[in-house]
Amino acid sequence: MIIAAYLPEFMSIRLGGEVNIVLVMGGGQFATTILITALYLRYAARQIDPRVQALYQDAVGEDPR
């Protein structure tokens, strides 16, 4: 996170006990990465995979599985 390089005082603010803003933002990065990946996998399964399978079947004439 680039913000840690420019605003270390802000990043070290404690929110409770040993938990500071850096820990919360780091956890948020993991959560958003997992969410974005799950959403893309859902999209790919519904939109991209059927199109690829149809193209393969048209080109080769057989089911890819």
Image (cartoon, helix red, strand yellow):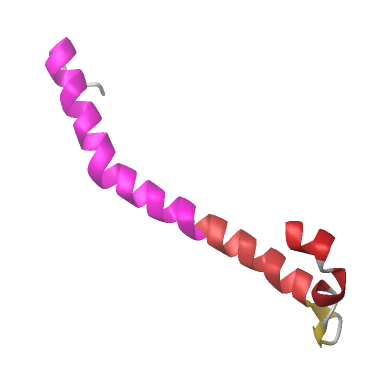
Establish if 62 lies above or below 19.
Answer: above
Which stretch did the figure color magenta? 35-61
Residue lying furthest top in this view? Answer: 60
Question: In the image, residue 25 lies at what x, y percent?
Answer: 69, 69
Return the residue nearer the eye: 10 or 21: 10
Taking the spot 81% from the left edge, 76% from the top edge, the residue there is: 10
Q: Quadrant of residue 52?
A: top left
In the displayed structure, does residue 53 sit left or right of residue 24?
Answer: left
Question: In the image, residue 33 lies at what x, y percent?
Answer: 55, 55
Q: Is residue 1 visible?
A: no
Taking the spot 62% from the left edge, 60% from the top edge, the residue there is: 30
Q: Quadrant of residue 2?
A: bottom right
Q: Is residue 64 magenta?
A: no
Establish if 50 lies above or below 36.
Answer: above
Q: Quadrant of residue 24?
A: bottom right
Question: In the image, residue 63 lies at what x, y percent?
Answer: 18, 21
Quarter of the image containing the C terminus? top left
Establish if 15 lies above or below 46.
Answer: below
In the displayed structure, does residue 4 sit left or right of residue 30?
Answer: right
